Image (cartoon, coloured by chain):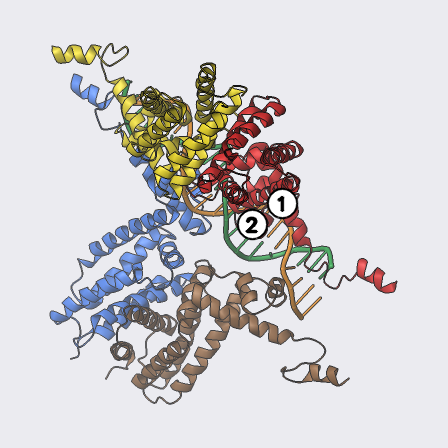
Chain colours: A blue, B brown, C red, D yellow, E orange, F green
Amino acid sequence: MAMVSRTTTSNRPKGRVATRQPASRARLLAAARALFVERGYHATRPQDISRTAGLGHGTFYLHFADKQACFMAFVEEARAEIDAAILGNAAKATDLPGLVEAILLAIYDYAERHPGVLVSVLSNEAVIAAAGSGNSILERWGEEWGERLKQQARQGLVARGYDFAVVGQAVVGAIHQASLASFERSRPKAALVRNLTRFITRALTPED
Amino acid sequence: MAMVSRTTTSNRPKGRVATRQPASRARLLAAARALFVERGYHATRPQDISRTAGLGHGTFYLHFADKQACFMAFVEEARAEIDAAILGNAAKATDLPGLVEAILLAIYDYAERHPGVLVSVLSNEAVIAAAGSGNSILERWGEEWGERLKQQARQGLVARGYDFAVVGQAVVGAIHQASLASFERSRPKAALVRNLTRFITRALTPED
Amino acid sequence: MAMVSRTTTSNRPKGRVATRQPASRARLLAAARALFVERGYHATRPQDISRTAGLGHGTFYLHFADKQACFMAFVEEARAEIDAAILGNAAKATDLPGLVEAILLAIYDYAERHPGVLVSVLSNEAVIAAAGSGNSILERWGEEWGERLKQQARQGLVARGYDFAVVGQAVVGAIHQASLASFERSRPKAALVRNLTRFITRALTPED
Amino acid sequence: MAMVSRTTTSNRPKGRVATRQPASRARLLAAARALFVERGYHATRPQDISRTAGLGHGTFYLHFADKQACFMAFVEEARAEIDAAILGNAAKATDLPGLVEAILLAIYDYAERHPGVLVSVLSNEAVIAAAGSGNSILERWGEEWGERLKQQARQGLVARGYDFAVVGQAVVGAIHQASLASFERSRPKAALVRNLTRFITRALTPED
DNA sequence: AATGAATGAGCCTTCATTCAT
DNA sequence: TATGAATGAAGGCTCATTCAT
């Protein structure tokens, strides 16, 4: 008892000595996320982030090398969340149409639960990675799709004869642009999912 | 007298009254194009454009409302060139694979003859049109593809049952991202064309 | 008459078209001089200089690459003034003691007519030229003294056998530090001149 | 026992209760010295000093009022070392040339054994003592030389009739600037010593 | 129509110092 | 005595745009 109360209240041998830091970083990242989503990369100043987080201007640079590094951290965070969401949904699928649909639904579900995040990440990333760095999130997803499809082709679930490095990117590009246009025009999600699923499935289903 | 008439008539398109306004605008636009392609939107200052064009700093604002308007003019110019190139090639095609391939070749041919222009237009556009303006070149192309496909579906050349507003965007997105990734990695163009043509054709070919 | 009035008032074919610039530069330099003397290099911000000159913040960078370049311009201006003053006085001298005294008086006269300038130049220069650049004003003066003495040695007015590259620096160093200490302690100028003249003269007078 | 008593009594002024405060101060000072010499005053942050000393950032302010006080402590330490070196060498000299040479050699010897220290002290001091504080090391040395020469004048070893407050500063100034210029240009030390010795000796030797 | 000097809001970042632990 | 996260004033500089000529 004595030990417990000591440990949890006053002393905290190590648990808190260096502990305000992680909290600060988390608060900064949360503030950054909110502002990047709301205003975009360029319109968000490190100062705004700090103030929103309730911290001093200089504290920002204790946790991020610069504004760009902070944005990258936000991007990475979002990417991890989305990947997790996709993985969760994709596991349940058994056939190709099921897989495509599961992934689309996972993405749109995430986009609804985190409004603006996906758009912010994808559109501001272009601002930063001066054209042609080849490391965008979209391209990484394209590669992942490529890998996934290559494996499914081996199992006969996807047509052979494709260069999946190309096709993976094509699938992600198709999803990206069709979704963006659809959301911007507030079109119903169901039609989007149905058409995209059919489009991708037909392109990839093995002949016969 | 002789001097005056010489000065006012000779090598200027419409040279009517006094000075050479159209020439100035054209020179500014050419300079802007070169600089936007070479350095990107943000790294190009109106001042740089004027000086490159051999004109005074203030002259820029005589011809463009602001920097953004100048960039849009460049985008529009490029778009018109590309559309013309595509239209020329697409006319020759008779079946769907032929059409897709013709269009792809037209685009890549343009990209080779005007290095950097396409990438500059597409990547810098994102910087400007703060997420969600819905007017990007890519989306316009998506709409055009939608129209085209809808017509071909009526003729039985393309599968029915699609919402072509969605599918048009998907096609353009697929082309865009696959091409970008391919070029960044310096992959052979032939494989890109082949895979993309097959991907799109299979997705769109009518059943049976 | 008509021509004269035209030229002096309205048109000014060329005299004024590009003319507000030199005036601005001069005003900035004057303001910089006043502030560098009054507050020192570090305590003077480019902004302060511009405001003191009655100009906008950005105008400063139209005329100077950066703060340091502005300070260098001030240093150079002062150096030219002092060199001119010294040359004027030194010409009258006939023998070595006369020369030394003439130079000392020229320097102290300048220092009185331009209070603080000399001290500011010499002390702030150290701040800028990170130790060991070897281009300080004092060293340039040392070199000039070296040249002067070498010539006088050839004429038999100064002792031979010296390496005047060393001795020139020694003379300037002696003058500099003795003068600085003297002024800081508000000691009478006469004693300073008398002792310094005697010191230098004895060191340099040819034997016999 | 021996160790304990040594630790608690010997080399710490007041070492009483528990921990190693003096050790901390000494480590900070050593770190400061290394960094001031290597990077200069402005480029060295209290934080760097603390970390280099293996101590926490805040500890710095337990031992020094501020950054400037720390630099002064470094200056004082170096001054004491140099004074000791000079005193040791100067004692052996019997005549004026011998004395001057002995002192010069002591200084250059120190400069070689402690590379950068002298230059760092002298050049950074100027940065700190905003023009005209009248307390620089050089001026203190000038005063000491003044005293020394005054005494020697009483003994007939140095010319009378000088105001040694002025001449002391002149001697130090001559040495300082000639040496600095010489080192910067990597000139041979021998010529420097010879010329400086001759210069000062001739200026100060009694007539006849 | 053309000029280019002038503008000043705004940007990102640094660093000496404090203070709760 | 020791710590190091936090602070925020201050810094130098850029650039899209205006306007007197």
Percent across and percent down for residue B186 are: 28, 71
- Residue under pointer 1: C28
**Which subunit holds the residue at mark 2?**
C
What quarter of the picture does the N terminus of chain A occupy? top left
Above or below, comparing residue E9 to residue B183 in the picture: above
Q: Would residue E13 appear left or right of C143 to someone viewing this image?
A: left
Percent across and percent down for residue D172 are: 45, 28
Percent across and percent down for residue B23 are: 61, 76
Instruction: Give neighbour class at mark 2: few <14, some 14-19, many 20+ (Cα, 10 Å).
Output: some
Disc number placed over residue D194 in the picture, else none: none
Q: Earlier in the sequence, mark 1 or mark 2?
A: 1
**Which subunit holds the residue at mark 1?**
C
Residue at x 43%, y 62% (from the top left corner): B126
Q: Secondary structure at mark 1?
A: helix
- Residue under pointer 2: C64
Q: Is the C-beta separation of discs 1 and 2 under 8 Å?
A: yes
Disc 2 marks a residue whose amino acid type is: Phe
Above or below, comparing residue C104 to residue B104 in the picture: above
* Cα distance between the residues tagged 1 and 2: 9 Å
Residue at x 46%, y 17% (from the top left corner): D156
